[in-house]
Structure formats: structure tokens, C-alpha cells
Amino acid sequence: MPHGQYPGLNVLANTSADNFSGITESTNLTFSSFVIENCGTNEEGVLSSLFFAITALQPTIPDARSGIRSSHGFKAIFKSNDAKTAILTQLDHIFNFKGLMGLRPEPDVLTPPRYACVDPISAFKYRSLNLGYDPWQKCLRESQPSFYGLGTAYIFLCPSFIRLELSPLSYKCPTVLDNQFIGDPKIFYQGYQAYRMIYELNRFYLGAHSLDATSDPPEQLDWNSCVSKLDMIQSIINPTNLELYVARNFGFAVVVQQQCVQVPNPSFLTLNASNPLSLALAMPESTASADEISLGNALITNSSLLDDITA
């Protein structure tokens, strides 16, 4: 299949390595390249969206290191300092396009993300993946501009993805009223290729551990639900939370300076009362047990813990 293979985008060469200190590397990851397939004349546009997505991480990484001291919503979106290691690890994986084992079509090979533009014959082209659905029909049937093929190395880009704006070109920060975001989420984060790439790359690395439409709780796509309906652990494995957090921190040269500071206060929101951890994390300082705290720090690097959490 026609494709272009690219080395990792080293757009953060001037970012201090200290930003990633303390992150535990998983043995099934490696620095790698990525592949764009079947995009034809849109390949350059896909490459640009990846460039902007990875560039968006530059202000996000140091902000995540500040945890709940962040002025850009870490506490609201992830609830606790105990989420820092997991979030920094996930950002590191995305930034470096690290490869994973166990993904079709080559489960025995470390495989980085592969991006495929969907067309009417994608079901035939990717029949070896055993997706269980026709990518073209999925694009037509569902409103999402892209989707990750669970268990595979592929992120599929629908024609509607190409029609999204690349990234915000002006200040798009939301306001907060009665402890809720107000405004149009499409203008802030849902309507841009760069942020959608962050979302899909997050799903790629979370894999089967990600919240989705069938999980309990189900995946939350609305920005207020990301804050009010999820505890710390659920916030880490809900893909939109990281997308929303990156969007709040994104700044590219002088074209875009989001750097949003208004955010709901999770301490005054009604979280899941049946989950003692969610109530503990709503307090200014977490009172969760040592075992509960360790879950957030090990989410990405210890899949057995993730299995326990999402079972």
C-alpha cells in the first residue's frame, strides 16, 4: 500500500530533558518513526496536523509537572497530583511516537502508530486486520472524524478529518459560569486536527484500557463531564481529558496562545459518591490510601493494574 514513513518529529529539541525525569519506561516501547498510508495528496496535510499536535505538547509537559499547582486546569481535569506520573508518561509516549508490541498486523514487532486515510475500499485494503467493520461505513455512519482500530497499529482518518481546521488561529479559551465551562467546545478543542490527533494517539497508547461507549463508566466526551463525572483514575483513561488539557496549554509561536486559566473547581462538584477514591480526590489534598495513590502512578507502565481498574 502506498505510504510515507517519517522519523519522529523532533520539534521539541529545545525542551529540557528534565521535563521527563522520573518517568519509568515500559519494556514494550521504543523510540520510533510513524507511517502515513493511502492519503495521496492529503499526506502533507496529515503530516502538518501531526507536527502541530506534537508541538502542542511543548507547554503541556512542564505544566503537567506542576500538578495541581497548574494554572491551566490540571486539578480540574485530573483531580490530583497522584496523576502526574501517568500523564507525563503518556505525553512522553505520544511525543516520541513509541512503538508497541502485540498490535495487528505484526504483533511480534514493535510497531509505532500508522495513519490511514479511509476510502470506499479500505475494508479490502485492511482486511488482514480483522476489524469487524468497514472503515468507510464507520466514517459515514458516525460523526467522528477519525478513530483508532483497537488491537491494531492503525489510526483511521475519515474524509471529514481533512476538512477540520488545522489548529486555532486566535484566542479560543472558554469562560466558566456557575462552576461549568460555557461556550462551544468545537471552537475550543473539538474542531481541530491537531487536538484530534492527540485524542487518537492517547487511545492508541491506552488501548483496551481506555474508557469507551461500553465501559463502566462510559467514555465522557463533553468537557464538563470530563471534570464532574470522573475520578482521578477514570480521568487518566478517558481520552478526551488529555485532549482538553493539551488544548488549554497549547501555544505555537505567536500564532496561537491559548494558555487558558478559567476552569471549574472540582472540589465543589458532585463526583461519584459510590467511589471513595473520587471523594478523597475532590479534597484540596488527597486523602486516598497509599495503594489507591499508587494506581495512578502505575497506570501506563503496569497493565495488570489497568486490568484491575477497568475490570
Image: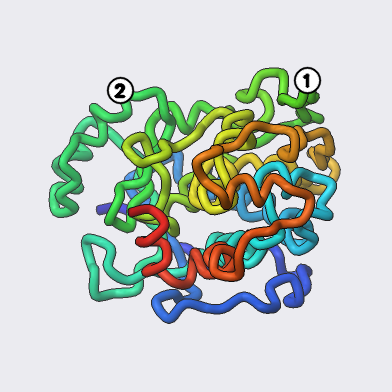
Residue 90, how many percent across, how many down?
Answer: 56, 61
Colour theme? rainbow
User: In front here: 259 or 280?
Assistant: 280
**What's the residue at 32%, 71% (across, down)?**
101
Name above or below for residue 45 compared with residue 177: below
Quadrant holding the C terminus: bottom left
Element carrying mark 1: loop
| Cα gap from disc 2 to disc 1, whole angstroms | 37 Å
Name which residue type carries label 1: Asp
User: In front here: 19 or 87?
Assistant: 87
Q: Is residue 178 left or right of residue 132?
A: right
- Residue tagged 1: 178
Q: Mark 2 or mark 1: which comes first in sequence?
A: 2
Which of label 2 and label 1 is nearer to you? 1
Residue 117, how many percent across, how many down?
Answer: 36, 41
Q: Is residue 101 left or right of residue 171?
A: left
Residue 298, how many percent across, how many down?
Answer: 52, 69
Name above or below for residue 155 compared with residue 178: below
Q: Is residue 126 left or right of residue 272?
A: left
**What's the residue at 56%, 49% (across, down)?**
276
Image quarter for residue 291? Answer: bottom right
User: In front here: 71 or 290?
Assistant: 290
- Residue tagged 2: 140
Name which residue type carries label 2: Leu
Crowd class of label 1 (few under 14; some 14 to 19; many from 20; radius 10 Å): few
